[in-house]
Image (cartoon, helix red, strand yellow):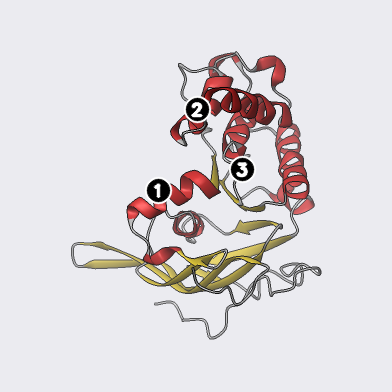
Amino acid sequence: MENNPYPNTAIETEEIWRVYKTGSLEVAALKGVNLQIAQGTFAALKGRSGSGKTTLLNCLGGLDSPTDGKIRIFGEEIHSWSERQLTRWRREQVGFIFQSFGLLPSLSAFENVELILRMSGVKGRERHEKTVHCLDLVGLTRWMHHRPFELSGGQQQRVAIARALANDPKLILADEPTGELDSTTAREILGLFQQIVREQNVTFLVVTHDNLVDDYVDYVLFLKDGQIDLEGQGHDAVPEAASAPAVVNADPVASG
């Protein structure tokens, strides 16, 4: 394991490029992204559709690989790992939450959460206790034996959150997690995210168009044309308590 130059930094990228090729055509979704996100913070990544937000999130979660550049998560250079290493790392240290919830419709809320622990090899009694604990954290103890179609959108998202928490992740990545929810439910979910960050000391990065997130996160990062937009994010991008800079984008590479 490499020494982390910023021991309180959860996410660090260094000149991340992601170029997609279709025949002779090349499209750069990310153009030299540099950022740092401190451990134990709740950060949001915003930008217009097509700005590269989901591509960046996928690269940070090891679901996609950068064409060039480096990604360090808690000091580990994940961009150089094999798919087998990434799969194990995602299973053990990362929680994912998606807009579409991603629940298996034939399984109950309990079974959807428990499945992650089964895949990680957690034994019976411990698996049961941990599943109940995660569902209790999100306020779904009474509904744990209901299947997704018997739950509201907000309740389904809470199941997805419980599932993301099941492996005790150090990092949670969420892609438009309130996109399918009304504003009241969205506030409940964002408040729950905030609570999880504070109580579980995880690092939480959410990609969103939802302006409600501004009331809950520690800071907002903006992505524009595949680059961190320093001018567009004002002075709220860097949390006061961070011991390392929240975002760095020196010498940005011009588009085109």
Residue 55 can be seen, yes or no: yes
Comes first in the chain, label 1 or label 3: 1
Question: Viewed as shown, does residue 232 lie left or right of 17?
Answer: right
User: Which kind of residue does numbered mark 3 sit on?
Assistant: Asp
- Secondary structure under tag 1 reads helix
Q: Taking 122 as reference, is 246 above or below it?
A: below
Q: Quadrant of residue 255?
A: bottom left
Q: Residue at x 72, y 51 (%)?
A: 201
User: Which kind of residue does numbered mark 2 sit on?
Assistant: Leu
The residue pinned by badge 2 equals 103
The residue pinned by badge 1 equals 87
Name the disc covering residue 168, or none: 3
Q: Taking 146 as reference, is 26 above or below it?
A: below
Q: Taking 157 as reference, is 193 above or below it?
A: below
Comes first in the chain, label 3 or label 2: 2
Residue 153 position within the rendered picture, expressed as x and y whole percent measured from the top left: 62, 26
Residue 245 position within the rendered picture, expressed as x and y whole percent measured from the top left: 69, 75
Q: Are marks 2 and 1 in contact (CB under 8 Å)?
A: no
Comes first in the chain, label 2 or label 1: 1
Q: Is label 3 or label 2 in front?
A: 3
Name the disc covering residue 97, or none: none
Q: Quadrant of residue 239?
A: bottom right
- Secondary structure under tag 3 reads loop
Q: What's the CA distance linking mark 3 and mark 2?
A: 19 Å
Q: Are marks 1 and 3 in contact (CB under 8 Å)?
A: no
Question: Extreme bottom residue here?
Answer: 251
Q: Nearer the viewer, residue 237 or 115?
A: 115
